């Protein structure tokens, strides 16, 4: 590779010298790789004289991962069972098996270090592994999905990329975890707040109370008439769409239903909208007014929980609404 890149001409050395230097580089890397498992040790060692900016580049490159690989393991337990599947993942993605193993071991290492720590998840990753902001946030998404074991492998979810799920993870971490309301709690950014999930059951009044459901529909229709192309379809399906969103919320007290959050959003809300040919713009307007008008209902007393729930659901649906 160095020959192809013209290193021989630049340095004016023989091929043998270049080959010997390259092999030295490989041996040096093999010796310092163990230090990369705990990046702070790399800065404090004296054996290898590596400039600080090269250390930062080495750490970042070592912990970088392919989004295609991450998509395959996202939501799975980071255990020996999953590691046995790396041959298949390598064949499917075209990523070298050795690279798959390095990436998987890095995921597992980061998970073990940060899963029990207090404090913001991405900041903990960044502090302990000296990664860039963006890479630390991506690792936070991997850790969060591995902890909550969200279902990501179903056929209907295959169109979603790692970036789609990473965005949704960021939303869930920011607004639904214990740390979203109390940054002094243990495991603050890893676990969803149980009290909040329990309180979501109260939102069922929005569809169980016929008068409230009719009033909510009337308010949304008055806001959207003439503003969306699928107004007729929206008006006809309003109650089904509303029940879908509320039923997803009310079931999140069960671990299995939490894991099925994304498949439920796709099957019960995104697919019906897609079949009626809603545009992303139609969906944005609907979800905006669906959320805001419910807060104006006189007898509806759950505005804080409602906005906390719908803020995340709206953002995730809009991110997931594509081919």
Image (cartoon, rainbow, N blue to C red):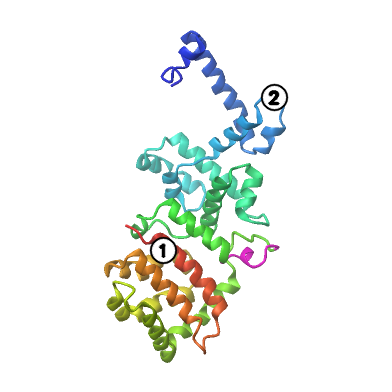
Q: Quadrant of the C terminus?
A: bottom left
Say whether residue 67 is magenta. no
The x and y percentages for residue 70 are: 46, 47
The x and y percentages for residue 200 are: 52, 77
Extreme residue in the front direction: 226
Q: For mark 1, what is the residue?
A: 318
Describe residue 135's horizontal placement relative to residue 320 as left or right: right
Describe residue 277's horizontal placement relative to residue 119 as left or right: left
Describe residue 317's horizontal placement relative to residue 128 as left or right: left
Magenta stretch secondary structure, dominant: loop
* Cα gap from disc 1 to disc 2, whole angstroms: 51 Å
Density class for disc 1 (Cα within 10 Å; few <14, some 14-19, many ≥20) is some
Please report whichever mark, 1 or 2, sits nearer to the chain's N-terminal start.
2
Q: Is residue 208 above or below residue 105?
A: below
Span shown in magenta: 176-184
Of circles 1 and 2, the one toward us is: 1
The x and y percentages for residue 291 are: 46, 76
Q: Is residue 14 above or below residue 187?
A: above
Q: Quadrant of the N terminus?
A: top left
The secondary structure type at the circle numbered 2 is loop
Give 258 or 314, whichever is nearer the viewer: 314
Extreme residue in the bottom direction: 211
Give 107 or 8, whichever is nearer the viewer: 8
Residue occupying image coordinates x 43% and y 77%: 290
Q: Residue 47, which numbered label?
A: 2
Density class for disc 2 (Cα within 10 Å; few <14, some 14-19, many ≥20) is few
Residue occupying image coordinates x 42% and y 35%: 96
Q: Residue 34, which numbered label?
A: none
* Res 156 visible: yes
Q: Is residue 34 above or below residue 184?
A: above
The secondary structure type at the circle numbered 1 is helix
């Amino acid at each position: 590779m160095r020959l192809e890149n013209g290193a021989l001409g630049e340095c004016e050395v023989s091929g043998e010298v270049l080959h010997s230097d390259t092999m030295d580089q490989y041996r040096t890397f093999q010796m310092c790789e163990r230090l990369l498992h705990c990046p702070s040790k790399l800065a404090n060692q004296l054996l290898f004289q590596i400039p600080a900016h090269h250390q930062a580049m080495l750490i970042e490159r070592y912990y970088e991962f392919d989004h295609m690989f991450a998509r395959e393991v996202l939501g799975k337990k980071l255990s020996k069972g999953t590691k046995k599947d790396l041959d298949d993942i390598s064949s499917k993605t075209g990523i070298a098996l050795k690279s798959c193993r390095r990436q998987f071991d890095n995921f597992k290492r980061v998970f073990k270090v940060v899963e029990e720590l207090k404090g913001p998840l991405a900041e903990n990753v960044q502090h302990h592994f000296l990664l860039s902001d963006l890479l630390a946030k991506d690792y936070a998404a991997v850790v969060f999905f591995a902890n909550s074991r969200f279902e990501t492998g179903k056929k209907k979810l295959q169109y979603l990329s790692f970036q789609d799920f990473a965005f949704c993870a960021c939303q869930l971490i920011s607004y639904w975890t214990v740390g979203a309301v109390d940054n002094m709690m243990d495991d603050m950014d890893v676990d969803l707040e149980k009290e909040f999930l329990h309180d979501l059951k109260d939102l069922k009044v929005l569809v169980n109370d016929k008068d409230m459901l009719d009033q909510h529909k009337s308010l949304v229709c008055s806001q959207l008439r003439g503003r969306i192309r699928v107004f007729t379809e929206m008006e006809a399906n309003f109650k089904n769409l509303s029940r879908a969103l509320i039923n997803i919320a009310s079931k999140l007290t069960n671990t299995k239903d939490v894991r099925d959050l994304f498949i439920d959003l796709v099957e019960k809300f995104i697919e019906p909208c897609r079949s009626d040919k809603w545009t992303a713009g139609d969906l944005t307007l609907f979800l905006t007014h669906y959320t805001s008008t419910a807060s104006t209902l006189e007898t509806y007393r759950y505005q804080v929980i409602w906005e906390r729930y719908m803020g995340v659901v709206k953002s995730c649906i809009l991110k997931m609404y594509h081919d």
